[in-house]
Amino acid sequence: MLRTTFVFLTSALLAMFFVAAQTSLSNLWWLSSVDMPITGSIIISMVLSDLIGMSVAGAFPIIAVVAAGLVIAFFVAHILSKFISTERKILYALAGGAALFAIVVLMPLAFYNLDLIAGARTSLGKGILIIGGMIAGYYFGVKSKKVVTNEES
Amino acid sequence: MKSLKSGVLLIGLFLFSALIHSNEVAYKTEVIVEGLDNPWSIAFVSENHWLVTERSGDLRTVKDGILQSDPVAGVPEVLFAGQGGLSEVLLHPNFSENRLVYLSFSESDSVETKLNRLTVVRGRLEENSLLEVKTIFNSYPLRKTAAHYGARMKFMADGTLLITSGDGFNYREKAQALDNHFGKIVRVNDDGSIPANNPFLNTPGALPEIWSYGHRNLQGLVISDDGSVFEHEHGPKGGDELNVVEPGRNYGWPAITYGVDYSGAIISPFTEQPGMEQPIQHWVPSIAPSGMTLYQGDMFPMWKGDLFISALVPGDVRRIELDGEKAIKETIMFNEFGRIRDVASALDGSLILATDGANGQLIRVSAVK
């Protein structure tokens, strides 16, 4: 259980990293396009600042939203795994993608179409974050499976 | 007996709280009108005849301090959603002769019904009806969001009309491009035609209405007697700005800002850049500036020439003393009424505050004689 929790938190952090990095890089890309003086140190510091800032310093903690989305999606995947013979890692990857889809596509519909995550304002950005969710889910599917296998053996 | 004493004490406290001395200026506050549905803007036809917009779509009339039951007829249908709805009401400089009233509002597109825009119309006010309503400005392009419309208006001394057009929230980068109306102040003639001396008239690809750019959500606009244009705008999380606006200038959003995103993400690591203007004042954390008036009345001589900025967070009015185009002192006032949506100078020299929300009030601030 402790290890599953650790794997889940790592998975949530992985998804959060994609959210923060995509937001930072899309902002930096645009700033560079209007000739703002972007340097390597600015890129590194902005990605790190966003990872921390979006986790704890926002008007709402995005990491909590991401974690809540993944908890729900993984729970549904866990139920489905009892009835579907799909590979576990694929099922959780789809669940992770669905969680991020809900956050970046469905959630704005409740807020007058406002994309509160800047990195998700374009279709490309939304796609990247959904793929990020799939990677986080895949990681959870692989690592949590190992835990179960070890406990059972 | 005990309840009588308590009652007397409460009345005493009420009177004490209603008569307040601020910077040696004695004033009293009184609620004039209650029950307004999200009041947004006030225009004074005469001392006893006011027009008030309700964001839900009605233009209401207050006569002799009494809210009239019937709204003004003929106001176009608005999109009342998010931050959108019926916004500014403004009288033409020659209103006494032509009876022209200008309204800004958000509206859904008739074809692409899921998209919307900022629209400005003008109409002739006769009795309690708006007649001959004509659209004089439509923001371009359409947006899917119901936020950041700007929607403030003011006439310049030459009779042209300035209109603030917000960045639409999702479209902030477009504030730096001249091919759209997001994050702009636009300038049109009183019939919506383009003035011949607009700054980007001869710039390839630029929309000819644009007067200044690089703004976010502009909610306050005043013009002083000497022609200085003061504008304030909501920042993101922090970074609200008070600017002096010049034609053709770039005010930087979102390439430079003193705020961060609501998500906590950095929007830009830069606060200044050559070719981009600096605010004369900025606020971190945000005060959510919502309206503004330049006090020119005689009721409060000490306030003459000062800006009064209404604020939604935490809910007060900021009195900004000016030295020319510089802000030299800020005083927090009227912080007992909650979120304040607008502040206006009435013709008798009193200040009128409009509180925000579904049970909005108009509160008069007048001198104690």
Image (cartoon, rainbow, N blue to C red):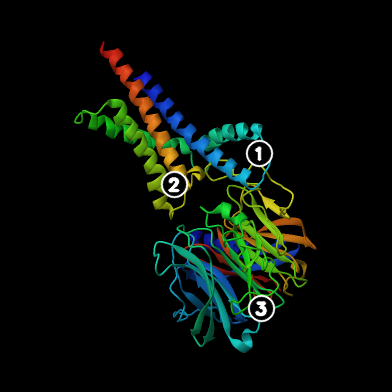
Q: Is residue B294 visible?
A: no
Q: Which residue is mark 3?
A: B347
Mark closest to the chain's N terminus, 1 or 2: 1
Query: Mark 3 and mark 1 in contact (Cβ < 8 Å)?
Result: no
Task: Count up the numbered dots.
Answer: 3
Query: Mark 2 and mark 1 in contact (Cβ < 8 Å)?
Result: no
Between residue A68 and residue B142, name the one nearer to us: B142
Looking at the rendered image, the quarter that the C terminus of chain B falls into is bottom right
Q: Nearer the viewer, mark 2 or mark 3?
A: 2
Q: Which structural element holds mark 3?
A: loop
Q: Which structural element holds mark 2?
A: helix
Which percent across, then down, holds residue B262? 54, 45
Which percent across, then down, holds residue B150? 57, 63
Residue farthest toward the top in the current orientation of the protein: A153
Residue A123's disc number: 2
Q: Chain of mark 3?
A: B
Q: Which residue is mark 1?
A: A38
With A1 as the anchor, is B185 left or right in this view?
A: right
Q: Nearer the viewer, mark 1 or mark 3?
A: 1
Between residue A12 and residue B40, name the one nearer to us: A12
